[in-house]
Amino acid sequence: MQIAPIVLFAYNRPWHLDQTVEALRQNELAGLSDLVIYSDGPKHSADQLKVEEVRKYIHTIEGFKSVKIIQRQKNYGLASSIITGVTETIDQYGRIIVLEDDLVTSPYFLRYLNEALNYYEKEDRVISIVGYIYPVEGLPETFFLRGTDCLGWATWKRGWDLFEADGQKLLAELKKRNLTKPFDYNGAYPYTKMLMHQIQGNISSWAIRWHASGFVKGLLTLFPGRSLVMHIGGDGSGTNCEVTNHLDVQLSFSPVAIGDIPVVEHEFARKKIQRYMLSLRPPLMIRGKQFLKRVIKRILLGKVEE
């Protein structure tokens, strides 16, 4: 089995990063995996000490086939850091597994992603593999949804080559093809509005553009029925983010089987996730538009921008 490199993006949260690395190290394929770490530079002088602490820590990491560290001299911000880092690494290796510094993984996370990358390598209808799934019960072992996601994911060069950085082009395509309603899960979540915020410069999200890039082309992402990724960044430690438990899941400690399933969107799973998203709306509406905006960021991005 071909083993994909793991690319880990870090900024100024040493405790979270340690949790991410320690869980990743417990994966059965960790010792066979190349680990590439991108450490972004401080945006403000107040972040300098934490960034230095992160950099001191990453130079002690062991337990992987190799560890390569790229330290940014300036602050790229999350979007630019991920876009450039993924592009650089995937151009070299041809495939990639991507993590951020607030994601704790199951010991079977790497097995699932690598098996799926090999199984669906020649299937052009599949753009990516994701290890996280919302806290929804009754889902199949694996299934496909249209578009992409961003919490512990993997893709091939052929998939990432389809990433469109121009949000305006993506929005025009969504409107031209009458896709804004399904893109928003039939009104359950305003992802179109989030894309508009990116275009207007209110947010610099890479993930909304990655999701839209796959969605407008009708491409699919494989999801597990049990989450192999747990998000630990909902504690208010990220910049300008609310404390929230909407991404909390029970981490699966059993392997997820990759099997021969139809390469089409799973309508039942989509409807279950849509109902979960709708269930979040009453408390969000009560607490106002600003809270809604921040929680949407967290659900799609996993964290806010640096």
Image: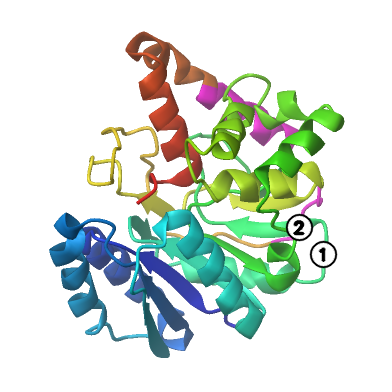
Q: Is residue 258 above or below residue 7?
A: above
Measure the alpha-carbon separation of dots 1 and 2.
6 Å
Mark 2: which amino acid? Val
- Residue at 71%, 49% (x, y): give it: 213
Residue receiving disc 2: 126
Residue 161 visible to an observer of this rendering: yes
Image disc number at residue 113: none
Q: Quadrant of residue 118?
A: bottom right
Residue 102 placement (x, y as % from top left): 33, 55
Q: Secondary structure at mark 1?
A: loop
As rendered, which of 204 and 207 lies closer to the eye?
A: 204
Image disc number at residue 123: 1
Does the magenta run of residues contain 261? yes
Q: Quadrant of residue 265?
A: top right
Residue 225 placement (x, y as % from top left): 56, 46
- Residue at 15%, 55% (x, y): give it: 46
Q: Are marks 1 and 2 in contact (CB under 8 Å)?
A: yes
Q: Secondary structure at mark 2?
A: strand
Q: Residues within 10 Å of mark 2 (few under 14, many from 20)?
A: many
Residue 128 placement (x, y as % from top left): 66, 59
As rendered, which of 177 and 21 lies closer to the eye?
A: 177
Mark 1: which amino acid? Glu
- Residue at 42%, 22% (x, y): give it: 292
Residue 2 visible to an observer of this rendering: no
Span shown in magenta? 259-277
